């Protein structure tokens, strides 16, 4: 394989490799670092002996991700408050990325898996890699790998969305929820939220965020009513309706000029999960897309 052919083969796989690494790690920055390291190893490899560049590169990326996950789990033990994956945000004026069908709630379910279970589930169930190839990638006997995949599938089954809504309906829901939440309209919120709804917020210790989940309709209603009274003089700004890892949501500029992305998990027609990302390290891509990173101010 000539050098140019090797570069073309890698670039043809790059987007898929970044997505695989992101799904493994929950961070685009870490995913891109892993893929860059994979490129260096690909450049040094005996490519004439490689039968399938895609399989070879997937194997490298998966193994690099497993190494990264081990250190990431240690970092998360000291993380301030709840940890949420970096949001994969699609804007309403863009073609929605359907890639692999994973949602934010399923990404969180993957956090309960061991690194090997996570890799087995993603490679086989999400990216369609044959079990024999997955076993080779993970250095496991195929029979043992099959059991690993079964356990992983069982763990994440509850995280699969049972209620998917159209983008237009999601945009209406996002706008309605934003308005009701920031107005403290508890009657409107009561019609939208499930009895066992939960709020998870990730500020990473960089900005103010709820440190613990807020669980239950009554507590959430009291929370939004209190926040609306307290911050009526400093209202938030709705910036854009977005899709966040397959879930309807929105980007907003909150009091103090804090950028926030909110995702809404819907079950049986009601909002069951509210996922709020405020950590600025995880919102750099969103800030750039909105022009906030360049000091342009929010779109009018």
Image (cartoon, grey):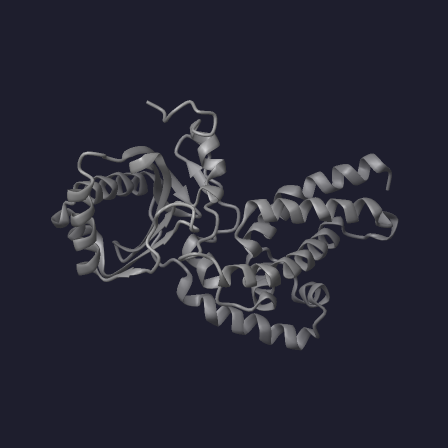
The vertical placement of 13 against 79, above or below, is above
Q: Quadrant of the N terminus?
A: top right
Foreground residue among 7 and 238: 238
Residue projecting furthest to the left: 187
Left of 57 or right of it: where is 293? left
Q: Quadrant of the C terminus?
A: top left
Instruction: Report x, y in % for residue 14.
Output: 66, 42
Instruction: Report x, y in % for residue 288.
Output: 48, 31
The vertical placement of 276 against 219, above or below, is above
For the image, the number of numbered tags is 0
The vertical placement of 183 against 149, above or below, is above
Residue 194 sits in which quadrant? Answer: bottom left
Residue 106 sits in which quadrant? Answer: bottom left
Residue at image point 69% right, 66% down: 138
**In this orientation, does residue 256 appear?**
yes
Foreground residue among 168 and 219: 219
**In this orientation, does residue 254 appear?**
no
Instruction: Report x, y in % for residue 231.
Output: 20, 40
Left of 20 or right of it: where is 79? left
Residue at image point 70% right, 39% down: 11
Residue at image point 54% right, 49% down: 27
Left of 164 or right of it: where is 71? right
Left of 127 or right of it: where is 106? left
Instruction: Report x, y in % for residue 287.
Output: 45, 33
């Amino acid at each position: 394989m000539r050098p140019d052919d090797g570069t073309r083969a890698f670039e043809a796989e790059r987007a898929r490799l970044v997505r695989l690494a992101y799904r493994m790690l929950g961070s685009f920055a870490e995913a891109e670092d892993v893929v860059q390291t994979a490129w260096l190893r690909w450049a040094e490899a005996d490519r004439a002996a490689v039968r399938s560049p895609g399989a070879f590169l997937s194997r490298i990326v998966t193994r690099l991700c497993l190494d990264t996950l081990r250190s990431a789990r240690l970092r998360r033990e000291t993380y301030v408050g709840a940890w949420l994956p970096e949001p994969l945000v699609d804007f309403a004026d863009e073609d929605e990325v359907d890639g692999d069908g994973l949602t934010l709630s399923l990404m969180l379910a993957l956090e309960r898996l061991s690194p090997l279970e996570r890799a087995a589930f993603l490679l086989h169930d999400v990216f369609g890699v044959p079990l024999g190839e997955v076993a080779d990638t993970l250095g496991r006997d195929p029979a043992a790998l099959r059991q690993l995949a079964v356990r992983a599938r069982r763990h994440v089954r509850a995280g699969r969305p049972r209620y998917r809504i159209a983008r237009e309906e999601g945009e209406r829901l996002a706008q309605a929820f934003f308005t009701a939440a920031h107005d403290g309209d508890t009657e409107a919120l009561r019609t939208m939220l499930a009895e066992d709804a939960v709020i998870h917020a990730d500020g990473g210790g960089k900005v103010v965020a709820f440190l613990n989940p807020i669980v239950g309709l009554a507590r959430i209603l009291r929370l939004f009513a209190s926040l609306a009274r307290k911050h009526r003089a400093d209202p938030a700004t709705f910036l854009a309706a977005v899709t966040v890892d397959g879930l309807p949501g929105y980007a907003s500029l909150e009091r103090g000029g804090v950028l926030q992305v909110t995702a809404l998990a819907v079950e049986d027609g009601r909002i069951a999960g509210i996922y709020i990302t405020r950590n600025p390290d995880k919102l750099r891509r969103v800030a750039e897309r909105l022009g906030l990173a360049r000091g342009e101010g929010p779109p009018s």
